[in-house]
Amino acid sequence: MDATTAPGSDAIAHVRSFNRAVTTRIGALQDHYLGSARSLGSSRVLWEVADDGIDVRDIRELLELDSGYLSRLLRSLEREGLVTVERSPVDTRVRTVRLTEAGRAERAELGRRSDELAESLLAPLSAGQQRRLVDAMDTVTKLLDAALVQVEPADAASDDARRSLAAYYDELARRFPAGFDPGRSLHPDTHEFAEPTGGFVLARLHGRAIGCGAVLFHDGEPAYIKRMWVDDAVRGMGVGRRILEALEQAARNHGAASVTLETNASLTEAIAMYRAAGYVEVEPFNDEVYADHWFEKPLG
Amino acid sequence: MDATTAPGSDAIAHVRSFNRAVTTRIGALQDHYLGSARSLGSSRVLWEVADDGIDVRDIRELLELDSGYLSRLLRSLEREGLVTVERSPVDTRVRTVRLTEAGRAERAELGRRSDELAESLLAPLSAGQQRRLVDAMDTVTKLLDAALVQVEPADAASDDARRSLAAYYDELARRFPAGFDPGRSLHPDTHEFAEPTGGFVLARLHGRAIGCGAVLFHDGEPAYIKRMWVDDAVRGMGVGRRILEALEQAARNHGAASVTLETNASLTEAIAMYRAAGYVEVEPFNDEVYADHWFEKPLG
DNA sequence: GAATTCATCTGACTAAAGTCAGAGATATGC
DNA sequence: GCATATCTCTGACTTTAGTCAGATGAATTC
């Protein structure tokens, strides 16, 4: 269960006036700075074409465009000499879009205008106000993203899960003074993290996996949480907490009366989160070589 | 001269990612919550029709719409039975738009959807995150507004100036323990606040006057600042500071080597601002009955 | 190797959003 | 009372944004 709360009507009024202020003000500026050159649609497409090209299919997914519509936008960009479209060598059904020299220049121009827009927002303010505005904008960006994070059960053998676990192992190898070898850790295999012996959840943002966690069920004994990881870039957004809650819920559903986990002193943020979530330190209950702190939490 | 600073490229990058996050995220939600019912254009028009009606001309100015386009939008709202359009009794060229019963219901529905949109942004977050988001949104809204404030020389006898001064006197009457009577204060007349004897500036936001200030030039002696006021609703946005700077610049242009002003102990924010702006307290230099603190600042 | 699925494209649409040039009626300044 | 300005409207456009139904050719599955 997520620790969400129904927002008060006062908060809603503030959000509404924010929506209004931001969409009218930034919308008007966007018309002014970006709108002049070309249609929004083709600008967006031009912007998504990375330096080493992008498949038409990926643009479609990214911008959620109708295939016919995108096709037409690409034809018009092609006519203007800004992009080339050719068959992908890997799968000749797929077509790959690449920027021409002129396209690269046009894309740089879009970037410049976007900078000008940003500058026009900041310029009238004092240095202190600029700092406060940028800070508040960062907070808004981050929390809007946080609201988009989805925590869901997943197959621990899936590509995204593998990638997440690999990122987790990498991080441990970097942070543990003596490095980390998953083979020496308990439960190196992921096949247990599935019904009926366990569970696995992935956190996603914009389709990308940005966190994971696993749980093992031990009938009549505490459930055991393992492999909790959150991507560096999204720390502080409450993702870890949500993963933890999903795993606890899974344990609860399996009749567990409590959950345990172990961790390492060098993972300070994780330890702080466990404590905040109601975990209390207990005597070592296993011989995980990488652990030096063991925790337990009763499930209400 | 305003105390503005050229923003760093790092700040610009943050603003850009904010623009992106906010326009895509809120834009998508707007399509979802508001777009379904009717076209954005007619929704915006419907929203602007206040309970006691609004002139077509005012809608056009508010929303910056082409007159032909607006006319057509109004015809379609009329056909749907949501508004009535009739000649204004004051000037029969002007037409006034009024909501019908159905229009009022439809407008309420728009408000409800706008609430839903706001709620959908907050709902997935924890109570703490919601609080942080709303705070940050308020800061952004306020500072975006602050960037729109214009401080400009104005005629002290104009309507906006009169209204600002009246608001100022009202506030003093409320805040001074013994009340305030402008007639007993020094320089009750505004005709001196104009070239060549003085100056007057107005601060505006969205066309509305939200602050003012006056200055008197005394050849060879310090210039003298008076009647500084900032609307309650926009305090803390640096408007006072900007008015002060505009008046100091006017004094500088007139060859003044320093500026003086006096104030009352009950105006604590004003006093804090004067000190922060480089004013130092001096001996009383006049017999303004409402003053108990006198300040001076050398002009660099 | 036939059937199916996939990626893209073309053609034929629609709705929204907006622009521009006047027309017609009314108000205002001199 | 005449010239000029103001306010709104209509008609005739254009551009943008998008939808939908196939057609085509390539890859995959059985």
Image: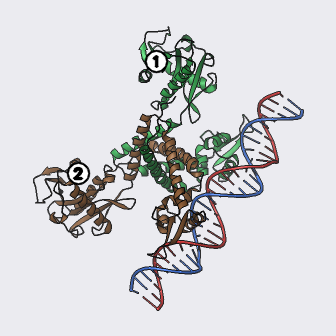
Chain colours: A green, B brown, C blue, D red
Q: Mark 1 points at which residue?
A: A297
Residue ID at (50%, 16%): A258
Residue ID at (33%, 53%): B233
Chain letter of the residue beneath label 1 in the structure image: A
Residue ID at (41%, 48%): B141
Q: Depth-wise, is mark 1 or mark 2 nearer the camera?
A: 1
Residue B219 visible in the snapshot: no
Q: Where is residue A21 in the image (x, y as percent from the top left)?
A: 45, 51
Q: Mark 2 points at which residue?
A: B270
User: As rendered, which of A287 and B231 lies closer to the eye?
Assistant: B231
Hey, which residue is sitting farthest front in the picture? B101
Q: Is residue A88 left or right of residue A118?
A: right
User: As rendered, which of A111 and A72 lies closer to the eye?
Assistant: A72
User: As rendered, which of A269 and C10 lies closer to the eye?
Assistant: A269
Q: Is residue B63 left or right of residue A126?
A: right
Residue B112 visible in the snapshot: yes
* Residue type at tag 2: Ala
Q: In this view, does B257 lie to the left or right of B163?
A: left
Considering the numbered disc 1 on the image, is that residue within a helix, a strand or a loop?
Answer: strand
Q: Are marks 1 and 2 on the same chain?
A: no
* Residue type at tag 1: Lys
Label 2 crowd (10 A; few <14 / some 14-19 / many >=20): some
What number is the disc on residue B143? none
Q: Where is residue A79 in the image (x, y as percent from the top left)?
A: 67, 53
Chain letter of the residue beneath label 2 in the structure image: B
Considering the numbered disc 2 on the image, is that residue within a helix, a strand or a loop?
Answer: helix
Q: Position of residue B129 (x, y in %)?
A: 43, 35
- Count of numbered tags: 2
Q: In this view, does B229 lie above or below A236?
A: below
Measure how far apart labels 1 and 2 are at the Cα level: 54 Å
